[in-house]
Amino acid sequence: MKVEDIKKILVVGAGTMGHGIAEIAAISGYKVYLSDISQDILNNALERIRWSLSKLQERGQIKESVDTIMSRITTIVGLDKTVSDADFSIEASTERMDIKRQVFSKLDELLPPHAILATNTSSLPISKIAEATKRQDKVVGMHFFNPPVLMQLVEVMKGDKTSDETAKITYDLAKKFGKQPIMINKDVPGYVVNRILGQINIASCILVEKKVADYREVDAVARYKLGFPMGVFELIDYTGVDVAYYVSKSREELGIRDDIPICSLIEQKFKNNELGVKTGKGFYTYPAPGKYVKP
Ligand code: 3HC
């Protein structure tokens, strides 16, 4: 198979990442199936995609009308035979190994033999996800960043059994999406970006826990000295405190002993359901759930 053979793309999970990935695929001209567990979640995703496309249109960043791009997206509650003509799937469900393996086993059953099954995981081993299928050579990582439509980078990660062909097609697809992909040849926890971000997060947490500085001050350093577009804690709120929590927790559950422990500030926020922008409160407070304004 070649990247040109991909006509239909299935995105599993319509949350923060999934809706943005579906949007990119539709902008790039692909027919898209967007699947999640309820129609409410899917309706919310369509609303977010429409909002985002309107913003891109205002700035002259899309060539077609919002309606034309939207018309390429078909929503599906659950996963059934409707998706059996998809050539490529991108899973963007909760960052938990048990959930991802269930999804991959179902995709393996439903999708045609040539289809590539990609995961947007940010930290879980591709090889372990692939074991839930009978096509381990066609399972690959394709990691986008939030917001997918604006972030240029995509990590393409190979599992132990991912074929070179699968990795190449995934890399080429990211290019077709107008992204700047990087190829990661080893299935290491956190890959490259979260490996680095994890260290930054934990260093920032330690400074706050030890009362060396307030989290706002750490964020000011990130913005005004390190040149980050957002503060460290602001970015955790933006991406989701739950995501940051699951990323560290999943490593622990898998027995991956690396040098990035769980940040107790993140754990506390997670337990209080203060998940950041999505709940309207995390490290900072936002005007309404899902409404991001610069803190
Ligand atoms: N679609 C279209 N337009 C959007 C948008 C979206 N999804 N999100 C924001 N915009 C628009 C805003 O509405 C605004 O438009 P306006 O000026 O007309 O109102 C414009 O983009 C600029 O946004 P902002 O004014 O809010 O501010 P910024 O200039 O700071 O840009 C940002 C926003 C691009 C998100 C920038 O702050 C940024 O790059 N932040 C860092 C994001 C990042 O690092 N993401 C990776 C996180 S790690 C991750 O995702 C991995 C995971 O697996 C853990």
Image (cartoon, grey):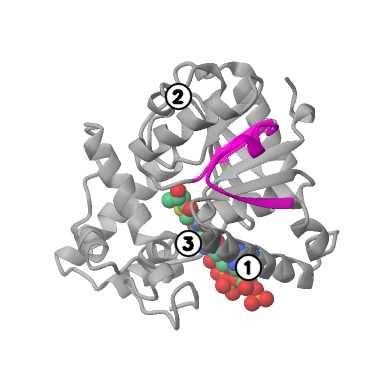
> In the picture, residue 90 is in which quadrant?
top right
| Residue drawn at point x = 37 percent, y = 79 percent | 285
Q: Quadrant of the N terminus?
A: top right
Q: Quadrant of the C terminus?
A: bottom left
| Residue drawn at point x = 59 percent, y = 64 percent | 43
Whereabouts is ligand 1, in terms of quadrant?
bottom right
Q: CA distance from mark 2 to mark 3?
A: 34 Å
Q: Secondary structure at mark 3?
A: loop
Q: Are marks 2 and 1 in contact (CB under 8 Å)?
A: no
Left or right side of 203 for 190: right
Task: Classify mark 3 as within 8 Å of ligand 1 or not, answering yes or no.
Answer: yes
Query: Residue 237 versus residue 82: which sits nearer the camera?
Result: 82
Q: Secondary structure at mark 2?
A: helix
Query: Residue 67 versus residue 207: which sits nearer the camera?
Result: 67
Q: CA distance from mark 2 to mark 1?
A: 32 Å
Q: Is residue 93 magenta?
A: no
Q: Amino acid at mark 2?
A: Ala
Q: Which mark is residue 47?
A: 1
Asked if one can make out residue 220 in the rendered structure from this viewpoint, the answer is: yes
**Residue that label 3 marks:** 228
> In the picture, residue 97 is in which quadrant?
top left
Q: Are marks 1 and 3 in contact (CB under 8 Å)?
A: no
| Residue drawn at point x = 22 percent, y = 33 percent | 257
> In the picture, residue 241 is in which quadrant?
bottom left
Looking at marks 2 and 3 on the same chain, the residue that comes earlier in the sequence is marked by: 2
Residue 253 higher or lower than 134, as above or below: below
Q: How many marks?
A: 3
Neighbours of disc 1 within 10 Å: few (<14), some (14-19), many (20+) = few
Q: Amino acid at mark 3?
A: Phe
